[in-house]
Image (cartoon, rainbow, N blue to C red):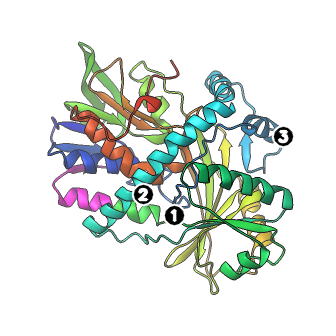
Amino acid sequence: MGLNPDVLVIGGGAVGICCAYYLHRQDLDVALIEQDEIASGCSGANAGLLVPSHSIPLASPGALSLGLKSMFKPASPFYIRPRLDYQLFRWLWQFARSCREKRMLAGLEKLRELNYASMELYQNLIEDEKLDCDYSQKGWLLAYKTAKEYQSAQEEAALLEKYGVAAKILDTQETLAMEPTLKPDMAGSVFYPDDAHLDPKKFVTALAERCLEHGMTIQKATKVNGFEIANGQVIGVKTAQGLLKPGQIVLSVGAWSGQTARLLGFGLPVQPAKGYSISIIRPNPCPTVPLYLSEAKVAVTPFRDRLRFAGTLELSGMSQTISWRRVSAIRKAAEEYMESIEAGGEPEIWCGLRPCTPDGLPLIGRLASYRNVLVATGHAMLGIHLAPVTGKLIAQVACAQKPDIDLAPYRVDRFQ
């Protein structure tokens, strides 16, 4: 690896790889380092959903009370593990302030803009680079078992339609006609036709290969141990493999963002949120469109050779220990919502940590305290979806160009 790249991207997940790709398209000398393997973090086996319909921020009215109630229900879809942790308490306090309707609606408008911009970039990126990643735009079907939740879903769909997100309300028969693998006791569903899906690991690794072919440098198993700082900027990045001296740095290490930022003496309000998935060999019959088993908060994504069930949001710190209770909850949801699925072979069980901010919006932009450090993190469950637009915006900021999207709502220091 060259010791003096124009830009060093730290982090080899979907966001980091997209940052490197778009930076290189600005004719910059780009290097990327990853502490583990490419796509080994939350890009590894998530649901792979590209969902403009998911434009309502995590911080919304009622979310905090739901999370606090879940502290006594370890198998619930949204779980906060009780612990003495000042950073968690501070994050929850900021989260509570963000759960007001006015702030949620403002966040919805901004996320919707990012979501659709990224969808357009995805289509161009996959076509231009000929990426084999199981990309398909078939929409997303959100299925409901209870009349109460089905009614709430219709109200949410009406809200999203006001912001330009297309939706179609389906009754029980229409739901089963669209997806016969669901059990007949569904109350109804909401179909979002603009949504798409892909295999996240295939996408990240395929784009990383293109980056290498285009002349970029990628170095795995390279952990950042510290930084050298002088005159208001970072002049060196310390790793076990040696000292790197890039012109600019992009911090894109997902759930590890807080730890890495502390090496700079800077706090980032990012909490790791553990998610789980179970992948099986594609059964026959298999869902034809991605599903959401709504009350259970479980996504079902059909890939070319596999079927994946993904869900839960667990605020339990940096632990990557698998809770078999939560795995069982995902399996139970599949049994309750879907007709019998024959799983061939041994299921692949996975968990990953997603970086969540208190207001549900990502952190995108330059650090005020270090003029050559940029941050791209905090995308929560939308990391795979928002990776291309984040990469393009970071490249524009790095080159002192006017970003395509106003970055004020995503300021890195907005919680200071």
Question: In this rendering, does residue 206 appear at all?
Answer: no
Residue toward you, 352 or 159: 159
| CB under 8 Å between discs 2 and 1 | yes
| CB under 8 Å between discs 1 and 3 | no
* Magenta extent: 206-221
Q: Amino acid at mark 3?
A: Phe
Horizontally, is 201 left or right of 312 in the view? Answer: left
| Residue, disc 1 | 194
Pointer 3 or 2: first along the chain: 3
Q: Does the segment drawn in magenta span residue 209?
A: yes
**Secondary element at tag 1:** loop
* Residue in view at x 62 percent, y 27 percent: 91
| Residue, disc 2 | 119
Pointer 2 or 1: first along the chain: 2
Q: Residue furthest front?
A: 162
Does 30 sit above or below residue 199? above
Q: Does the segment drawn in magenta span residue 315?
A: no
Q: Quadrant of residue 399?
A: top left
The spot of residue 70 in percent (x, y) is: 79, 41
| Residue, disc 3 | 72
